[in-house]
Amino acid sequence: MEVTSTPDPIDDLDARLLLLLTDEPRLGVLECSRRLGVARGTVQARLDRLDRIGVLTGFPPALDLAAMGYGLTAFATLEIAQGRRGLVTEGLTAIDEVCEVHATTGSGDLMVRMVAKSNADLQRVIDEVVNVPGVQRMSTSIALSTPIPPRFRPLLERVTQG
């Protein structure tokens, strides 16, 4: 029986392009092509492909939520009624302070990252979350600091080194 392997979704040039845009997200296609030593069309084709296969999901600005007044970050584990993930997710989407939600294994069903302006504001957000239909139980932890912020660089660098 022959085993076939699927090609990696990104190669060295893709990784170098993504590293460049990670460091300087405002760079244009022409400047990226100049710095990478490839044609402008090559950079555009790579970006189009990375977008099409779902690796590149956009170019949002990096925001400091604390500087916007949301200095408190909390993580909540939610236990939800079976078969209600869609309903709960829809309810959580309606809460502005809910930044992201992950379906998880283990004792909880969903992991929620949320922000608030103060402890009192966090209580308000928690009250909104527990009132979402289908939420049965919630356990919350407040983040004291973020020693490792969201990052992708090590994964991209691994591609360029290997």
Image (cartoon, helix red, strand yellow):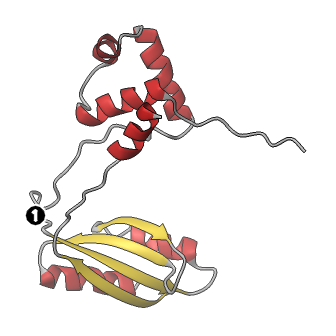
Residue at the spot x=24%, y=59% of the render? 148
Q: Position of residue 67 (x, y in %)?
A: 9, 57
**Which residue extends farthest front?**
162
**Which residue extends farthest bottom?**
137
Q: Position of residue 45 (x, y in %)?
A: 50, 18
Location of the N terminus by quadrant is top right
69 versus 92 height, above or below: above
Image quadrant of residue 52?
Answer: top right
Image quadrant of residue 146?
Answer: bottom left
131 versus 110 height, above or below: below
Q: Which SS class for mark 1?
A: loop
Amino acid type indicated by mark 1 = Gly
Question: 145 or 73: which is nearer to us?
Answer: 145
Left or right of 158, for residue 72: left
Image quadrant of residue 149?
Answer: bottom left
65 versus 4 height, above or below: below
152 versus 95 height, above or below: above
Residue at the spot x=38%, y=73% of the render? 112
Q: Position of residue 95 (x, y in %)?
A: 33, 70
Asked if residue 135 shows in the view, the reply is: yes
Q: Position of residue 44 (x, y in %)?
A: 44, 18
Residue at the spot x=24%, y=28% of the render? 26
Residue beneath disc 1: 69
